[in-house]
Amino acid sequence: MYSDISPTQTSDTEHHPTALLTRTEAIGSHPTVLGDIYRDDINIAIWERELPDAVQHAVSALISEKPHYGVSLNVTPDNVREGLEESLDLVVHQTLINDIELLVNMFCCLFDLKRVGLRLTVIDKAMCPRFHTDKVPCRLVTTYQNVATEWLPHNVVDHTKLGRGSNGKPDSESGLYAHAEDIRQLNCFDVALLKGESWEGNEEAGLVHRSPAHDPDQSRLLLTLDFAD
């Protein structure tokens, strides 16, 4: 995966200072779409998927049993299961562990990594409510329950309005984007690769994204994978 957005209109000249850096998205229903992240013109690759009911039941059980759960690990494809089993019930959460192990293997294989930084967190507030880019080469994100990450296509963003460039104004008023309809959102269960500012050749073209607005009645379960230090 915002409400109460009042977009500010700007001219094309004002609104597209990085227009020469063409970036777009790759979206597909097969995991091979994630390989498109290597294309120079792609800064987000999205694998649209459904999860078996057994995984969804395991996720619901985790949030119910451990409403403040959070774990941060450096793992390899060989020890990720062991790492997660230290804090998750092997029987109740088995299908969730299986899915995370699969994603770790895919991420390591795609980027030829021996280990990754894994974060699995139950979220009851907006972690990064302002639009931003990440100072990383690439990050995998997937939301297992509730609303998912929001993002902006590169061609609608005025990058000079990010961070301090907003002059303290909300994103909806700073001129960062022109229309509320510009905001895109991942679906729950989607697996997305977000290309960051540290990817060689992608400077000033990292995917602009933010956490969704918090619903006080619904917690999220978010998994992120990063290149390990």
Image: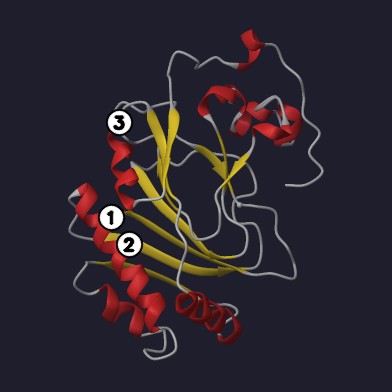
Instruction: Give the residue displayed 64% in from the left and 43% down from the top.
Output: 130
Assess whether mark 2 and mark 1 are in contact (beta carbons under 8 angstroms).
yes
Per the image, label 3 sits on a secondary structure element best described as loop
Amino acid type of the residue that numbered disc 1 sits on in the rendered structure = Phe
Q: Residue 196, position in %: x, y?
A: 40, 38
Instruction: Give the residue displayed 64% in from the left and 52% down from the top.
Output: 212
In the depicted view, which residue is nearer to us: 203 or 56? Answer: 56
Relative to residue 82, is residue 209 drawn left or right? right
CA–CA distance between discs 2 and 3?
21 Å
The circle on residue 47 is: none
Per the image, label 2 sits on a secondary structure element best described as helix
The circle on residue 39 is: 3
Amino acid type of the residue that numbered disc 3 sits on in the rendered structure = Arg
Quadrant (top left, top right, bottom left, bottom right) of the C terminus: bottom left
Q: Which residue is mark 2?
A: 103
Q: Which residue is mark 1?
A: 107
Assess whether mark 3 and mark 2 are in contact (beta carbons under 8 angstroms).
no
Instruction: Give the residue displayed 45% in from the left and 42% down from the top.
Output: 134
CA–CA distance between discs 1 and 3?
16 Å
Relative to residue 223, is residue 216 drawn left or right? right
For residue 164, which quarter of the picture?
top right
For residue 103, which quarter of the picture?
bottom left
In the depicted view, which residue is nearer to us: 174 or 108? Answer: 108
- In the displayed structure, 162 sits above or below 141; it is above
Per the image, label 1 sits on a secondary structure element best described as helix
Crowding near the residue tagged with mark 2, few <14, some 14–19, many ≥20 C-alpha atoms within 10 Å: some
Amino acid type of the residue that numbered disc 2 sits on in the rendered structure = Leu
